[in-house]
Amino acid sequence: MPNLRGIVQQLKTERDRAQKEVERLNAALMALGNLGSRSGGLRRVRTVDYAQS
């Protein structure tokens, strides 16, 4: 059954590739999720220059 061995090897290779992609997606989601939880996040803060007042 050499053909079956080749198929199993292809499936293992594809599984490894998919697992790496999921890890990259998880890292991206974590990075995006952390943007809003940091102090300030993506909010713009209006500053006032008192010298111009």
Image: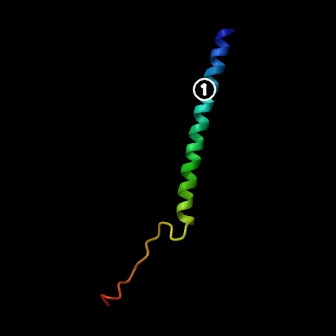
Residue that numbered label 1 is attached to? 13
When the figure is inspected, residue 15 is found, relative to residue 1, above or below; the finding is: below
Q: Quadrant of residue 18?
A: top right
Q: Secondary structure at mark 1?
A: helix
* Residue drawn 32% across the image and 90% down it: 53
* Residue 3, image x, y percentages: 64, 11
* Residue drawn 57% across the image and 49% down it: 27
When the figure is inspected, residue 41 is found, relative to residue 11, above or below; the finding is: below
The N terminus lies in which quarter of the figure?
top right
* Residue 38, image x, y percentages: 55, 66
* Residue 24, image x, y percentages: 55, 44
Q: How is the image coloured?
A: rainbow
Q: Quadrant of residue 25?
A: top right
* Residue drawn 63% across the image and 31% down it: 15
| Residue furthest out toward the top | 1
Q: Nearer the viewer, residue 53 or 15?
A: 53
When the figure is inspected, residue 49 is found, relative to residue 38, above or below; the finding is: below
| Residue furthest out toward the bottom | 53
Q: Nearer the viewer, residue 22 or 51?
A: 51
| Residue furthest out toward the right | 1
Identify which amino acid the numbered label 1 is placed on.
Thr
| Residue furthest out toward the front | 51
When the figure is inspected, residue 13 is found, relative to residue 21, above or below; the finding is: above
* Residue 5, image x, y percentages: 67, 15
Marker count (numbered): 1
* Residue drawn 32% across the image and 88% down it: 51
Q: Mark 1, residues whose alpha carbon is within 10 Å: few (<14), some, or many (≥20)? A: few
